[in-house]
Amino acid sequence: MTHATGRTEEARETPPPWAPATADWMAVHRAHARVTDAVERALDRRHRLRVSEFHVLAALAGAPERSLRMQDLAEAVGLTHSSVSRLTGRLEDRSLCERCLCPDDRRGVFGRLTDQGAELAALAAVTYAEALSAVLSRSGMAVDRTPGGLHFLVGPSA
């Protein structure tokens, strides 16, 4: 059957060559959204934290002297400098971190985890791991760490 566009029915049913890769990436995207939503709900319920706030606390907790330059913190959590600046402002309002001027370069700003922030980061890390494990198990997804890197197994329902 020929359509007004001049394309035949058969041509319309043949997927473009990039379709499998796009479908695979969309499955990863949906799986990531499902996992992030479940972890976010758990962090919010138990600690009044968003996932991005936890990532900032965790990055600072793992840094030398629990401190990172703001641009390094942004890179560590995969956000823009301005997003991290807003996040650290909210965390600073809760006394979980503080912003400090760099002693060597007064233009540089560091984010530093407070003792209260370190305590919350440790508690929230347990919640994060539990929620992550539960949603991966429920969804038939898995993360496999090998010497070659991480492998994400996403089931057909993603």
Image (spheres, grey):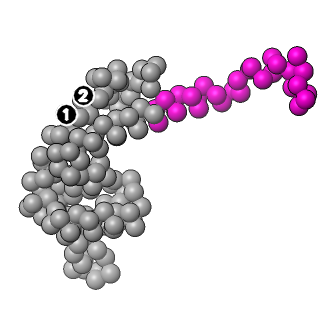
Q: Quadrant of the C terminus?
A: top left
Q: Residue at x 38, y 63 (%)?
A: 83
Examine the image and state in which quarter residue 34 appears.
top left
60 or 6, nearer to the observer: 6
Examine the image and state in which quarter residue 56 appears.
bottom left
Element type at mark 1: helix
How far separated are the C-alphas under marks 1 and 2? 6 Å
Q: Is residue 72 visible?
A: no
Q: Residue at x 27, y 42 (%)?
A: 41
Q: Residue at x 89, y 31 (%)?
A: 5
- Answer above or below: position of 21 versus 110: above
Residue sticking out furthest to the bottom: 106
> Crowding at label 1, few (<14), some or many (≥20) Cα neighbours within 10 Å?
few
Q: Residue at x 29, y 29 (%)?
A: 135
What residue did someone put label 1 on?
A: 130
Residue 40 horizontal/vertical position (percent): 29, 44
Residue 18 horizontal/vertical position (percent): 66, 30
Inspect the image, locate mark 2, and give the three-letter code of the amino acid beneath it: Ala
Element type at mark 2: helix
- As drawn, the label of residue 134 is 2
